[in-house]
């Protein structure tokens, strides 16, 4: 009888630790991703990935210029098809916001010419879905 109780306790502890581990994994994944940001080098115009560290501030070190010229990039998910129709794409173009340097400057995507603003909005969900379907996802 005593042994059965012990097995029951052990099984319960095993299940609880499993749930805790699962919750940890579930919670850390989006947090990790949101810290992993795409930056763009203001000097060379080239993008690079960087995980911002506590205490770090922009401009951050750019591996392209070997100097602190890295700013977080806005992502343009727009593209134009051969008929000049606006479409969404899944692989965004990183764009450096000109307003970081001149508050009045407007930014357009060097790839497609679409306006790019701070916290750049994605194309409407139906266009993103269409892009996913076109990519077979
Ligand atoms: Zn674009």
Image (spheres, rainbow, N blue to C red):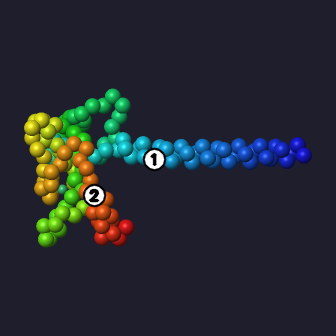
- Dividing the picture into quarters, in which one does residue 104 lie? top left
Decide which of 7, 132 is in the foreground and name it: 132
SS for tag 1? helix
According to the picture, the residue beneath numbered tag 1 turns out to be 29
- Dividing the picture into quarters, in which one does residue 53 lie? top left
SS for tag 2? loop
Q: Earlier in the sequence, mark 2 or mark 1?
A: 1
**98, above or below 91, in the image:** above
Residue 8 location in percent, x, y? Answer: 79, 46
Residue found at the very far top of the displayed protein? 55
Decide which of 88, 92 is in the foreground and name it: 88
- Dividing the picture into quarters, in which one does residue 50 lie? top left
- Residue at position x 25%, y 44% from top? 119
Split into quadrants, the picture shows ligand 1 in the one at bottom left
Residue 42 location in percent, x, y? Answer: 16, 41
1 left or right of 7 in image: right
According to the picture, the residue beneath numbered tag 2 turns out to be 124
- Residue at position x 43%, y 46% from top? 30
Decide which of 63, 10 is in the foreground and name it: 10
Whether residue 119 appears in this view of the structure is: yes
97 left or right of 5 in image: left
Residue 76 location in percent, x, y? Answer: 22, 53
Packing grade of label 2 (10 A; few <14, some 14-19, many >=20) is few
């Amino acid at each position: 009888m005593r042994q059965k109780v012990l097995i029951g306790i052990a099984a319960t502890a095993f299940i609880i630790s499993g749930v805790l581990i699962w919750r940890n994994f579930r919670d850390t994944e989006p947090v990790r991703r949101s810290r992993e940001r795409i930056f763009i080098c203001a000097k060379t115009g080239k993008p690079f990935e960087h995980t911002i560290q506590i205490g770090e501030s922009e401009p951050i070190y750019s591996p392209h210029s070997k100097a602190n010229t890295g700013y977080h990039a806005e992502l343009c998910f727009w593209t134009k098809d051969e008929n000049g129709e606006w479409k969404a794409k899944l692989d965004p173009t990183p764009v450096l916001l000109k307003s970081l340097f001149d508050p009045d400057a407007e930014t357009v995507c060097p790839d497609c010419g679409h306006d790019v603003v701070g916290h750049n909005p994605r194309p409407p969900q139906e266009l993103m879905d269409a892009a996913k379907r076109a990519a077979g996802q």
